[in-house]
């Protein structure tokens, strides 16, 4: 497994804001990136770490026309002891492989990509913020590069990984989101590409997201594409509801992205002995529970925010308050627990965290 490394002459590190709480999300990118190429003749080759910069891509590159692409999002954390840690990164790369299979893209060796990812994060360790809640966001991206117009699978590909520091999602503490249930637009349907992390799904989501914003809501809650009845995901997060003493999330129906955070939350809740169900949940059941007071909490899960409490749900001209618009106790407890593990304040009982700088 060869890996060549070409370093920058001058780091851009000093261009970062002094105040790490001003980092925001997805705005800063580090000095280097990992790349590897695929061709039918050579298969995967030229594994390299090179200076961050524009890609050399033909204007006819197939990814730009037909969206043959998939990506991942994960984070590296600096623990309270200064150590550099990754959280369940193999699961992210396994999901990238699953997405790639769905999109007729060549298989890759997960270990080869894991190795490149770790070497890149270690090279960029000075870019990992020191403030609690901040992290180094890691974005693997896998694209079709044949210069060709016509719908078929590409022959040549590029897989690259970029990283950049991101600020705390909640610098001022939790801020529960208001969600708008779209019954006009859908994100994905079973048999489509909703369970792949691929760019087309996000392009498809923009119009509903814009309408929700215009109406004063933060995020869209997607219903299933066929019956427009069952709750699926919110924005780019999986969704959990606490009704009575049952915690409910949608099963992986084929139109839902199998979130790593979703899986972590399910595992933790089961470990805690909480009554959790992966079952279809009709929006009417959510509304009825909101009305009779049994809807205790709702929250989204995803790598960026970890836990995103929901303060209200808007459906068919009615807004229903959730947990009095505050952060519910279970949302808070899950958030604290996962962050304690990621920042190594607490020992990780699940084997999810790997220290990579020793
Ligand atoms: C990435 C993503 C999620 C969350 O996945 P995590 O692995 O928890 O970050 C959920 N839904 C969609 C649509 C996503 O793109």
Image (spheres, grey):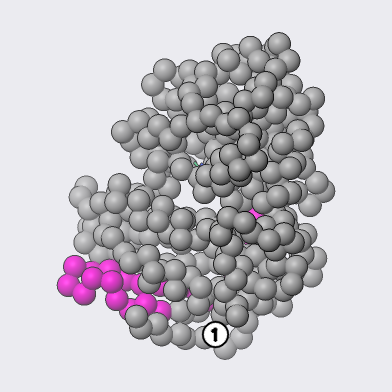
Residue shown at the point (70%, 28%) measured from the top left: 297
Q: Is residue 143 magenta-colored?
A: no
Q: Position of residue 332 (x, y in %)?
A: 75, 41
Q: Which residues are magenta?
A: 25-48
Q: Quadrant of residue 35?
A: bottom left
Q: Secondary structure at mark 1?
A: loop
Q: Position of residue 138 (x, y in %)?
A: 54, 63
Residue shown at the point (46%, 19%) measured from the top left: 228
- Report if residue 26 is visible in the image: no
* Residue 223 to residue 335: above or below: above
In terms of depth relative to the viewer, which is nearer, 149 or 72?
A: 72
Name the residue tied to disc 1. Answer: 8
Image quarter of the N terminus = bottom left
Q: Residue furthest left?
A: 41
Residue shown at the point (30%, 47%) measured from the top left: 102
Figure disc tally: 1
Q: Residue furthest right?
A: 172
In terms of depth relative to the viewer, which is nearer, 72 or 157?
A: 72
- Report if residue 273 is visible in the image: yes
* Residue 257 to residue 37: above or below: above
Q: Indicate left or right for 293 with 207 as reference.
A: right
Image quarter of the C terminus = bottom right
In terms of depth relative to the viewer, which is nearer, 284 or 208?
A: 284
Q: Quadrant of residue 273?
A: top right
* Badge 1 residue CB within 8 Å of ligand 1: no
Q: Position of residue 136 (x, y in %)?
A: 62, 65
Q: Indicate left or right for 332 with 275 as reference.
A: right
């Amino acid at each position: 497994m060869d890996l060549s490394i070409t370093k920058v002459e001058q780091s851009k590190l000093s261009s970062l804001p002094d105040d790490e709480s001003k980092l925001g999300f997805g705005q800063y990118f580090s000095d280097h990136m990992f790349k590897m190429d695929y061709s039918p003749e050579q298969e995967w080759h030229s594994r390299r770490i090179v200076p961050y910069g524009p890609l050399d891509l033909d204007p006819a590159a197939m990814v730009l026309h037909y969206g043959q692409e998939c990506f991942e999002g994960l984070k590296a954390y600096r623990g309270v002891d200064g150590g550099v840690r990754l959280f369940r990164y193999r699961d992210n790369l396994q999901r990238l492989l699953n997405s790639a299979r769905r999109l007729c893209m060549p298989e890759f060796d997960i270990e080869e990509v894991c190795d490149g990812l770790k070497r890149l994060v270690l090279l960029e360790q000075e870019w990992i913020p020191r403030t609690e809640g901040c992290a180094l966001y890691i974005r693997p991206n896998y694209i079709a590069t044949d210069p060709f117009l016509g719908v078929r699978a590409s022959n040549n590909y590029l897989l690259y990984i970029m990283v950049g520091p991101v600020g705390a999602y909640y610098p001022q503490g939790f801020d529960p989101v208001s969600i708008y249930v779209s019954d006009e637009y859908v994100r994905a349907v079973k048999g489509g590409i909703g369970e792949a992390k691929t760019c087309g799904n996000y392009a498809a989501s923009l119009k509903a997201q814009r309408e929700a914003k215009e109406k004063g809501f933060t995020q869209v809650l997607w219903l299933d594409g066929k019956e427009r009845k069952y709750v699926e995901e919110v924005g780019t997060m999986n969704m959990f509801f606490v009704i009575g003493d049952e915690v409910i999330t949608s099963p992986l129906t084929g139109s839902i992205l199998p979130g790593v955070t979703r899986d972590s939350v399910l595992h933790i809740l089961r470990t805690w002995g909480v009554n959790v169900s992966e079952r279809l949940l009709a929006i009417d059941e959510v509304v009825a529970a909101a009305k009779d007071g049994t809807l205790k909490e709702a929250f989204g899960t995803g790598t960026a925010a970890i836990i995103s409490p929901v303060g209200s749900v808007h459906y068919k001209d009615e807004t229903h308050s959730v947990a009095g618009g505050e952060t519910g106790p279970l949302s808070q407890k899950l958030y604290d627990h996962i962050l304690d593990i990621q920042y190594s304040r607490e020992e990780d009982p699940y084997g999810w965290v790997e220290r990579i700088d020793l």
